[in-house]
Image (cartoon, helix red, strand yellow):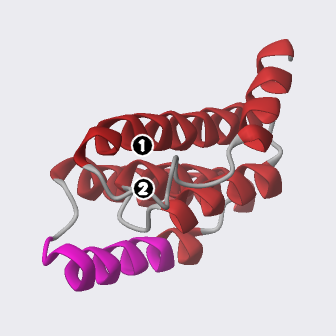
Amino acid sequence: MQKLTHYREAVKLYKGLYLAEVNETWVYSHREHLRQNYLNILLQVAEIYLQMSNYELALDYIQRALDEDNCLEAAYRLSFRVYAAMGNRPAVVRQYQKCCEVLQREINATPSPQTQALLSGTAQITVNLAKFVMG
C-alpha cells in the first residue's frame, strides 16, 4: 500500500513535458525519459488497482496514460485485462478496436502480436467466466 501512495504522489508531481518551451536537442532525451517514467508509474498504479479489484480507478489511470500517449499499447492491453476481470467482453473488443484505429491513424501500424494475443486470451477468459457464472 505504501508503494501505491508513493506512486500517486509521483503522479501528482508530473506537470507535463519537461521544459516544454525549450526546443533544443539536449532536452529531448531528458524530456522523454521523464515522460516514460510518468507513463510507467500510471500503468503500475493501474495494475495495483486491478489487483485490488478497484476497476474504476484502474481504468482512470489507464486513461491518463492514453491521454498522454494514445499509441501506448501497454495501456490498451492493461485495459483489456481490467474489462475482462469485470466480465465486460464488449468493452474489451471496443478497446481493441480503438487501439487499432489509433495506431492506424497515428503511425500507420497494426497492434503488436502481443496485443493481438492478449485480446484472444481475454476474450476466452470472459467467455469462460460467463459460463461459470451462468452455471
Element assignment for label 1: helix
Residue at figure coordinates x 35%, y 42% from the top left: 27
Q: Which mark is residue 120?
A: none
Residue 94: % across, % down: 49, 80
Please report contact status of discs 1 and 2: CB closer than 8 Å, yes or no: no
In this rendered view, identify the residue nearer to me: 44 or 52: 44
Relative horizontal placement of residue 2, taking residue 73 as reference (left or right) = right
State the quadrant of the N terminus.
top right
The image shows residue 32, relative to residue 65, as above or below, that is above
Q: Is residue 86 visible?
A: no
Label 1 vs label 2, nearer the camera? 2
Of residues 67 and 63, the one drawn nearer to the viewer in this rendering: 67
Residue stretch in magenta? 93-109
Give the residue at mark 2. 22
From mark 1 to mark 2, how far is it between C-alphas? 10 Å
* Overall secondary structure of the magenta section: helix
The residue under label 1 is 31
| Circle 2: residue type | Val
Q: Which residue is drawn at 37% across and 43% down?
A: 32
Task: Locate the C terminus by quadrant.
Answer: bottom right
Side of 33 where 16 appears, left or right:
right
Residue 1 to residue 59: above or below: above
* Amino acid type of the residue tagged 1 in the rendering: Arg
Residue at image position (43%, 68%) is 70
Closer to the camera, 72 or 16? 16
Q: Earlier in the sequence, mark 1 or mark 2?
A: 2
The answer to whether residue 66 is visible is yes
Number of marks drawn: 2
Helix, strand or loop status at disc 2? loop
Left or right: residue 15 compared with residue 6: left
